[in-house]
Image: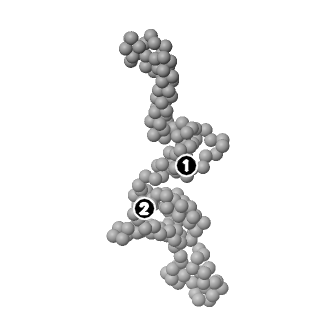
Amino acid sequence: MKTNLMEYLPGVFQGIREYRTITAVQDADLDRVKTEITNVLKNQYVNELDKNGCKRYEKILGVKPMDTDTIEERRFRILTRVNEQLPYTIRGISKRLSDLCGEDGYIIRMDKERYILEVKVALSAKKNIEAVKSLMERITPCNLILSVTLLYNTHEIVSAFTHDELSAFLHSRIREEEF
């Protein structure tokens, strides 16, 4: 709807050329302001983002758009990152870790009294530890101390082998390689 400030002037002033010129300029300015306000309000919602809104969210969230991305693809990537930051339960984190490491590829332990979240990645999923660290750093609440480490071989696992069998390996390999 186009703005018409002349309607707000008393009839006496509507015939004066200077007032017509002033209101015509102000009408155009107010139309631009209304359009910008509408855009700002729309850009509060990911599903209605325009190009500038996408650019702003991508900068805030650290999302790198590709040159070939459409607005819809950019919105989807932003929505994915926004949803990733929702607070997670241990069950939700376990589901994500299962996707990355497999069902038996991790151990998760929460010390509620000391606010420590400990994730140990099994040696079978060792190649995924950086992805797990990255994920956990993004989704873990800031009031928790996060520890992501490898789940090394323990005496219980290694005791199935004789000393002669183990002497063929370096200590670091016995500790850090999957048997």
- In the figure, is residue 116 to the left or right of 48? left
Front position in the image: 53 or 141: 53
| Residue located 38% across and 18% down the image | 8
Q: Quadrant of residue 16?
A: top left
Counting from the top left corner in percent of width and height, residue 19 is at 46, 17
Are there few (<14), some (14-19), or many (20+) residues within 10 Å of tag 2?
A: few
| Residue located 60% across and 81% down the image | 172
Residue 131 position (above or below residue 174)? above
Residue tagged 1: 59
Q: Secondary structure at mark 2?
A: loop
Q: Secondary structure at mark 1?
A: helix
What kind of residue is marked 2? Answer: Cys
- Measure the alpha-carbon separation of dots 2 and 1: 21 Å
**Is there CB contact under 8 Å for labels 2 and 1?**
no
In this view, the mark in front (2 or 1): 1
Mark closer to the chain start, 2 or 1? 1
Residue 103 position (above or below residue 168)? above
Q: Which mark is residue 142?
A: 2
Counting from the top left corner in percent of width and height, residue 167 is at 63, 87
Front position in the image: 65 or 13: 13
Counting from the top left corner in percent of width and height, residue 84 is at 48, 52
Front position in the image: 98 or 42: 42
Front position in the image: 169 or 130: 130
| Residue located 47% across and 26% down the image | 30
- In the figure, is residue 69 to the left or right of 136? right
